[in-house]
Image (spheres, helix red, strand yellow):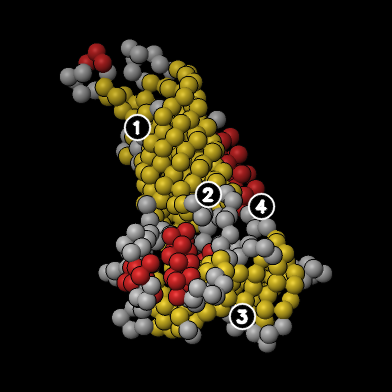
Amino acid sequence: MKNTFVLAFGLFLLFVSAHAQSPSLPGYIVRNPGDTLRGLLQEQTMDESSRSVLFKSANEASYHTYTLAEVRAYQFDGGDLFRAVTYSDTRLDQPVDKRCFAKLLVAGEYDLYNFTEREVLLFLARKDSSFYLMYDDDLMTTSGIKGNFRSELNFFSALCDAARGDVERATYTSGSMIAFFQKVDACLSPGKTVTTYYHKQPGKAGMFAYVGGIPLGNKSQFTAEAAFRLIWPKVSPNVSLNVGFRYANVVKRIINPNYQFGGITYPETFQIKSLPVTFQFNITKGIVQPFIYTGLSFVLVDVASQVPEIYRDNNHSTGVAFVVGAGIEVRLLHFLWARAEWRDEFISQWPTVGLALKFP
């Protein structure tokens, strides 16, 4: 059974790799000479969108990758608008000028943009011809750097009493920052139109796969899991709904109940096949992401015990189990992560360490 599951799991990974392409959407790019080309844009992750754009005309078969040196703006029809901007990264000891494609959120007296760098959300505010970087306290920003976004909000609201009281109530989210800059823009330029380019995104579907294990002498565990993930980036990009299937082979040692003071233990093997539905919360963003999750699962469990007096060979049970777990992921490549986790599902399982694939 274990070999059959592993084979099926491998075929699933091949399917995931073959079908991990992002959808194509109509839109346009504005090249640096100033000419506009209409065609199809391919959706990318926020990190990728800040570095390049994938574009092809209607009669082309494949996409071209356009960089910041070639394109000054691009937009999906009826959707997000990205512009090439230059800003000073003040998180470093010596500020460094950087350039990226940033997504326009609000256009007015002050413009508001956002983008991500290593999956860390960052905001840019334009005043006159300068862009000001705003960042939050986050484990994955530069070590020892304190977030500056409240001090920057104080700066932008200095001439607007109506917005100054909102600085302490503001949160480091797109919705809160948009509302703040809308109020500031309306306050400073009552007769000027304030345009909001914010577009709510529906849930984004993805896939997840994990293989891991741990040897503990005469105890061990092997785990394989594959699941569909649903994320609502605009609601909370750190929360995902996961539905899939999981296999765990857990070897424990138990004491013979008739000789509890003799210290004699026997192996007991649990083969747990389950269909879990869980909510996972990633505590931080970036390269290192601790996480917790909880949910329910339908389980099929086979227990084989070598305790002579118990005779539990091939003991079979089914039912609904409560699931809870925690762990940490470290990104190795865009889609490849090192993962360590502990899980309680039917029984408290051993911690496992392995590799995970996530699309997107």
Q: Which residue is mark 1?
A: 348
Disc on the earlier residue, 4 or 2: 4
Amino acid carrying mark 3 in the image = Arg
* Percent x, y of residue 172: 39, 61
Which of 147 and 292 lies nearest the eye of the viewer? 147
User: Which residue is tagged 4?
Assistant: 19
Q: Which mark is residue 231?
A: 2
Counting from the top left corner in percent of width and height, residue 245 is at 54, 36
CA separation, marks 3 and 4? 31 Å
Q: Which of pointers 1 and 4 lies earlier in the amino acid sequence?
A: 4
| Distance from the alpha carbon under mark 4 to that under mark 2 | 18 Å
Can residue 132 be seen here? The reply is yes
Q: Residue at x 44, y 44 (%)?
A: 280
Give the mark nearest the N terminus, 3 or 2: 3
Element at badge 2?
strand
**Marks 2/1: CA distance?**
28 Å
